Each structure stands twice: as structure tokens, then as C-alpha cells.
Amino acid sequence: MKKSRDDYLTLFFISIIGFYILISLAFPMYAILSKSFENKDGEFIGLENYQSYFENSSLVYSIYNSLFVSIVTMVITISLAFVFAYALTKSRMAGKGVFRSIAMIPILVPSLLSGISLIYLFGKQGIFRELLMGYEIYGPIGIIIAEVFYTFPHALLIIVTALSIGDARLYEAAKVLRSKSIRTFFTVTLPSAKYGVISAAFVVFTLVITDFGIPKVIGGNYNVLAVDVYKQVIGQQNFEMGAVVSMVLVFPALIAFAVDRIVQRKQVAILTSRSVVHEPNESKTFDRIMFGYCSLISALILTILGMCLYASLVTFWPYNLTLSLKNYQFDLMDGGGWDSYYNSIRMASYTAVFGTIAVFAGAYFVEKARSLKTGRSILHLLSMMPMAIPGLVLGLAYIFFFNHPDNPLNFLYGTMAILVICTITHFYTVSHLTALTSLKQIDNEFEHVSSSLKQPFYKTFFRVTVPISLPAIFEIGIYFFVNAMTTVSAVVFLYSSKTTLASVAVLNMDDAGDIAPAAAMGMMIFYTNAAVRIVYVLITKKILVRFQNWRVKTT
Amino acid sequence: MAKIKNLFLIFTVFIFSSASLMAKTELTVYTAVEAEDLKKYAATFNEDHPDIEINWVRDSTGIITAKLLAEKDNPQADIIWGLAGTSAMLMKSEGMFEPYAPKGLDQLDPKFRDSANPPSWTGMDAWVAAVCVNTIEAEKYGLPMPGSWEDLTNSVYEGHVAMPNPNSSGTGFLDVSSWLQIFGEDGGWDYMDRLHKNISHYTHSGSKPCKQAASGEVPIGVSFAFRGARSKEAGAPIEIIVPAEGVGWEMEATAIIKGTSNLEAAKTLADWSISRKAMEMYNDAYAVVGMPGVAKPVKHFPEGLLEAMIKNDFEYAAKNRKDILAEWQRRYDSKSEPKS
């Protein structure tokens, strides 16, 4: 068959996006892997670094610590989130929308803000210190509480989705067979949500084991892998050992990723075209219990956020509790001052715009292109890879790859561009999946028709695909923006004196002992993300009305 | 098609534009000066030299030192301004500096310059170790006011003392090197073994122990006098203690990095860094500055601090820096393992 212009164009764009992922992910990962086998002078020394790593007992102990906090957090978060999700999907309690919004708050703040809040709540001068009954908040207890806060919304989103696809016909059958509600829960609800729960568990596990902001702030002397990477690289500039610890960190993350992928594949099969959406029955007692539970969880989330807000406004904790804006004078602190806040906004905006373009175009070619089957599956595979790589490891890999004197892309080092590239890549996969899901809903007939009408594909793309997918496109944009504002791990090795960022400033101010200003900067990130989210909701409502009219049946 | 082309054009322009904005001469300055003073330093310098823009890279002493050493073959800094003298000596021995005699060198106290001619580095001021004690917290836990380093090893202070990790903090290193000089090598390590039992945690930065003492997170913080004075000024209920055995101190230095592409601007800054105006600026926070006769007493500084400064052997500290730090890490960094 003769290749058409469309085919060449498709090949061209697939190559560009594939090449982008190669440069921003595969090559740097190769660089960090080979670095872990080299000595300071760049000579290959085999497994020597790994040997000295495993001989250092305090470093190896971190593996155990990391696994411990990750698994405990996983169990707690999944239990709490499951009941919350159950309340949102299977009850008829009031205030579901409010509960849902409150539960999403942790996504809008940098992970380490919860650690800072815990210092104010349970530290030596904390207001609820007695509740700990003499235990120290600095250490595993603090890490786990803060990580639960941070991972809760991530787990909730996945479990809510899993629970909402429960097939109503099964519930009907259970009812007809006079099954008790407990029995129905274990034989119908749980099995249908099983894969969602497993998937959420692995997401939480990966988030915790790769997070370093929280253990850095509240871990005290309790070392974990992610902090070790940071200490080796920033504290001792021992890049080779940093590379080794990174590889150790990638390992559990990769396993979690693989399991999650397998599970996700099975999940799809449950939903068939004949499934009927289950509507919960009314049960006053059950609804009240659920309402009480959700109120409690929401109150806890709001307490953690509220504490930070209060702490950021107190003049000198705990001896001078008059309120002032003194802690917002960032120019007198570490971390780059107000400039870092504006840099963050710029960085997040670029990431949102370019990330969305790259991701949506990439997903479009994977899903809708009419040729190049192999190329498309390779592109899809490449698009899934970033999820398996912890941000900290990606950032370190960028140093090795982009700062290499022989790399023609060397000039990117230390610029805003490298921060944008790293952040886009770090959050690529989830956006890619969002885009794919949205594109799958659009019938391929559009492409077939336009093809037979001899229309170039980009006409269909701009006239049909993009307008229909606008809600998803905005969702992806906002996802990039919010995450670019809050991420620390992906950028902590890459910022320069001219591109300091707000999230990193939170970390650095805490490091220097300026914890109240750190809380203040964290709150600035929260205000910004919350404002952007609200504006987004208002705008999409308007756009939805205009572009989504076709969804409403006109009879 | 045009649309797509445009998109990519915009993409390329946006991505690369941030890399290529150049205006007046920019100097990349590596420093460990307290963050709150950086704007003031740059602004005061710019009063005399508005054509030179300073880009600060600031972190704790150990971090900046490690960063400079790591970048040795591909230096990113033009000049250091405000880095520990022992770090400067170490870097000099690695041949990383461009020797230069700044204008007004003869005005400096001879202690505050590299003895070679022309010198590789010049001193600015000195910062002095001190112990911050939170009086409210000390009362709460029934802790007596410590009067000496030895006092701090008393078991009543167990879990109540924070000190900086010398691997990252210059203050931490000057503490350790001063103990090794005060108590002798064996006595010093023995002292730290006993002190270690009382330490609640080691911090990344040298100011943090005092800031934590100021906010009551820990009753006692081993830190430096200027940090204590600032916290006291801010209203913290702290006393600044000068231990009886004497206190370690360290000077801050300026030095031009060899191979800088902005040599002229770097020289201008080096000249200015030892000018009278600069010395008066340092004196806002530092009781001891490099030019004799300039220093006025600093508010909230404890009495007898200057007299308590030990006769510091910087050559010893600089030469053994690496070994001391390695030994320290071997002995104490294992606080990372959970206490059983």
C-alpha cells in the first residue's frame, strides 16, 4: 500500500514525541545506571559501589525503615480511604460534594507541609503534644501520620472509581436471594472493587517509599532511602553513591508498578457493556454513621491545614502569639524569597501548557492514528515508563545526563526549561492515561469518515477530537499545574540560583530552622492551587455548556 | 499544518528563551552567609557598583564546600564571598583559586589573609561559637544553666541538646575542631562520645539548633553567637552562654575561582569585600571584622565572648578536615539507626 501524506505526518509526530521521551527519560536513566558502576573519576568499577553500600549498616537499615513506613502507611490509608469511598458511593448521606472537596485538599499542598503541621501539633511545643503519651513525633510516627494525609486523596480517587463500577444487577440478585448486607459486602462489593483496592495500595506504597519531603522534615534520626539519596548528593556531593541508592529505590517502585499494571488490565474486564450502575438504597442509620465518619476524617484534614495557616500567621511561636505577616517576608529567608514563588508559577504554567500539548498529542496518535501499529505500541510503552521512576531518581539522572560536558543539550542545565521538562516527564503517565480514557470514548468512525472523505487527520483532530475532549484537556492541564507547584522531589537537584522554586524553598527554610516561614510558603502554594482549581471549575462549566451541548439529547 | 508549525515554533521559543536572557555583568557568588543578610550585602555592594549583578548560591558551609569541590573541573562559581576560612584553605591546596591582592590589603589584620603573596583569599569577619539556652524550657525540665562544654555532658541534659552536623555545617565543624584543640585529640573525641549521649539530634544547618532553642523545640542549641543575638532580638526567651573552656571561631573569606570568565568583575567584588564600607556592614552582625578599629559592640552579644575565643589553629583544622569529618561520621552518624 502506498504511504499517504498522513502516514508520513503520523510517523513524524510519533517520532518526535517518542524521541522526547527517550531524551527526557530513557537516556538519563541509562546515565544514572552506568554512574552507579563508576568511581569518582568515571572509571568502570563493577559492583564496588554496591558492595560498599551494603557494607554500610546505617544505609542498609534505611531499606528496612522505608519498607516499614510504606507498608504501615499503605494499610492505614487504604482502610481509611476505603470506608470514605464506600460512604461516597454506597450511601445517601448529605454533603458528599463537600466531603469530596475536603478530601482532595492534600493534593494541593507540598507533601512536606503536613510534616510541618505535625511539628506544630505534636512537637515539643505542639498544642496536642499530650496525645502522643510521651512518644516522639519525630520519627516513624510522624512520617506515617503525614504520609497518610498526603496519600489519602490518591487512594480515595482510585477506590471511588472502583466502587462506582459495581454492577447493580449483582446487588439485585443478592437482594432477591435474601443475602444479608454483610454477606453482600463480602461477596459482591469487595470482589468488584478488589483490583481497585490493590491498585490503590500499590500507588500509596510507591508514593510513600519515593517521598522524601516528609521524612526530611519530621523523620528526625529515622533514615529512609529517599532521604539517603538526598543526603548523599546534596550533603556529601557523593553522586556515585547517590546513584546506587537511587537504583535500590527504583527496585521496589518498579515491582509496585508492574503489579499495578497487571491488576489494571484485569480491572477493565469487569466492566461490560451490560453493566448497570448501582444506586444505593436509603438507610438512615448507615447514612448517619457514614456521615459521622466522613466528618471526622474531614475535620482531621482541616486541622492539619488549619494548623499551618495559623502557624504561618503567628509572630513568634510559641512565645508571642500575636498575628502578623512577618513570616511572609520570604526575602529575608533561605530558599530564594518571593522570586521562588513567582518562578514556581511560571514553571507550573509552562508545564501545564506544554505538558498538555505533548501528552494529548501523544495519546491521540497512540489511540487514533490510522497506521504504524508498531510505532504506536512503542510510544504507548514509552508513555507508561515515567510512572515507574521516582522523581528524585529522575532529577538525579538529569544531572548525570544533561550536565555531561559532551552532551549537546548541556546548555539546558540550570535553566527553567530543564525544570519544565523534568516535571512534564515525571507526571507524564497519569496524564497520558487520562487522555487515553477520554479518547477511547470517541468513536473511531470519525477518523474513518474523514479518511474516506480524504481529509487530513489534523483537520479531524482540531475540529472534532479537541473540542470533544476539552474537559479532559483541562483536567490534564490542571493536573500538571498543581503537581508542578507542589513537587519537590523531581526538581530539588535541578534548580539554580535563578530558578529557585516555592516548594523547594519550603524544604530549605525548614532546613535552616525557619519553620514558620516554611509553613507560610506552603500556604502560598495552597492558595494558588486552590484559586486555580476554583477558576478552572468556573471556566469548565462555561466551556462545557458551549462545547458539550451535543451530549444533551434534543428531542 | 501552519497551526501545528506555529505551535512548535512557540514551544521552542518558550523553552529556550529563558536560557538566553543576558543583561549586565552577572557574578555567580557561592556563599554561606545567613540568608536574611544576602539582599543587604548585594544592595550595599550595588550602591558602589550598580553594573554588577550578584547571583547568590547559598547553603550551609559543608554543602557549599562539597559543591565547589565536586565542580572543580567545571566550575560554576565566579567567586566565593562568605565561606569558612578552613574551607578556603582546603580549596587553595586543591589549586582552585586565582591569587589576587585586592586594593587595601594592607589595611587588613594579617590573621585575616592568606599569608602567600599575592594571597589566594582574604578574610571578612569572624563568627564565634556559643550555646543558646531557652530559659523557659530549661526551667520546665529543671535544667541548671550550663557554664562550660563539660557541663553539657552532665546526664541531666540527656536528649535536651541539639548541635549541627559538622559534615554539612561550618559551625558544627568549628565546634568539633575547637574541641579537638581544647581537649587534645583523644580528649576531644572522648568529650564528643560523652556529649553524643545527650544529643537529641544533629541538624543540617548551624543556625537551626539556636532557632530551635528559640522556639522551644529543644532547650539547648549549640550554635553561634550572632544567631543567638538575632533570635533574642526577635523576642526569644534565650540566654547566650559562653562556655568557660573557650569557644571555637572561624573567619569568613573571599576568594576568586580560577578560570572564571568574569575575572574583572570578580576582582571588583574582591576589592570591595575588604573595603571599610563592607567591614561596617559585616559589623552589623559580627563582633569581629577583618579591619582593625572598625568593629563596634553588637547588641545582645554575651560578655566575655571575644576574650573566650581560642587561639585557633586553622592550618590544623583545614589540613585534617577530611579525616575529622570521616571519623565524626563513623562515630556519630549512626544516630540514624532507631534507638532500641
Image (tube, rainbow, N blue to C red):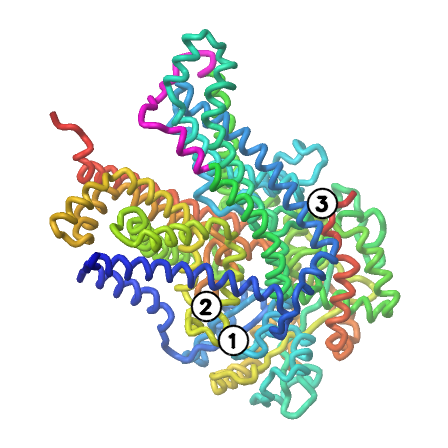
**Distance from label 2 to label 3 (Cα)?**
44 Å
**Mark 2: secondary structure:** loop
Asked if labels 1 and 2 share a chain, the reply is no
Report whether B32 appears left or right of B145. left
**Mark 1: secondary structure:** loop
Please tell me the numbered disc located at residue B137.
Answer: 3
Across and down, in percent, residue B102 comes to: 57, 88
Q: In the picture shown, does residue B87 fall above or below A462?
A: below
Residue at 43 percent across and 35 percent down: it is: A157
Report whether B319 appears left or right of B76. right
Q: Name the residue tied to disc 2.
A: A414
Nearer-the-camera pick, A372 or B196 = A372
Residue at 22 percent across and 45 percent down: it is: A465
The residue carrying pointer 2 sits among few (fewer than 14), some (14 to 19) or many (20 or more) residues within 10 Å by Cα, namely many
Q: Name the residue tied to disc 1.
A: B76
Report whether A100 appears left or right of A400. left
| 1 vs 3, front mark | 1
